[in-house]
Amino acid sequence: MEYRKLIAEAVAAKESAYVPYSHFRVGAAILTRSGEIYSGCNIENASFSATNCAERTAVFKAVSEGRREFEALAVNGDNGDYLPPCGVCRQVLAEFCDLDTFLVILANSEEDYRVMTLGELLPGAFSRESLRAGGTSGDEK
């Protein structure tokens, strides 16, 4: 896989970030199995819990367009270091992505990046299989 294009999209998405409180911009770009790229930026809100991360913005844009199969995500932030997705974003990714094959690219630039699997970032993820394994329908006691 060519990471440079995905990273470039994440870096470009960061420019649209709405961050009047933290002034900490983040951009992300997710690659679908069909080769499409959806980008997103972080969008803050005065009610901080209503803030949406760049990674979730990219995923939600893709899912809202009917895409459900993904290969990789690139993330770039203003911190000057590799910026991993937060726990909530990792869980959202686990809903749609294979833990063992989905790649998360933590990028400072197109030349300086680190690649990890989602499973490395979210060991023991809660998934739809978790709901089936030993779960009950609620009618059983």
Image (cartoon, rainbow, N blue to C red):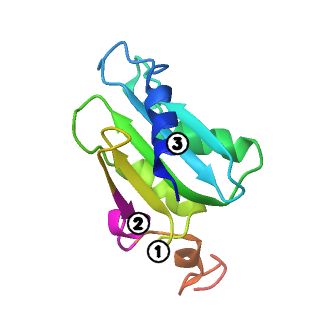
Q: Amino acid at mark 3?
A: Lys
In the picture shown, does residue 55 fall above or below 141? above
Q: Position of residue 125 (x, y in %)?
A: 42, 69
Separation of marks 3 and 1 at Cα, in angstroms: 22 Å
- Where disc 2 sits, the SS reads strand
In the picture shown, does residue 15 fall above or below 65? above
- Span highlighted in magenta in the image: 115-124
- Where disc 3 sits, the SS reads helix
Q: Position of residue 41 (x, y in %)?
A: 48, 29
- Where disc 1 sits, the SS reads loop
Dividing the picture into quadrants, the one containing residue 15 is top left
Q: Amino acid at mark 2?
A: Thr
Image quarter in which the C terminus is found: bottom right
In the picture shown, does residue 12 fall above or below 57? above
Residue indicated by mark 1: 100
Is 31 colored magenta in this rendering? Answer: no
Residue indicated by mark 2: 117
Dot 3 alpha-carbon crowd within 10 angstroms: few under 14, some 14 to 19, many 20 or more: some
The reply to whether residue 47 is visible in this rendering is yes
Residue indicated by mark 3: 5
Q: Residue at x 41, y 42 (%)?
A: 75
Q: Residue at x 30, y 39 (%)?
A: 108
Q: Amino acid at mark 1?
A: Asp
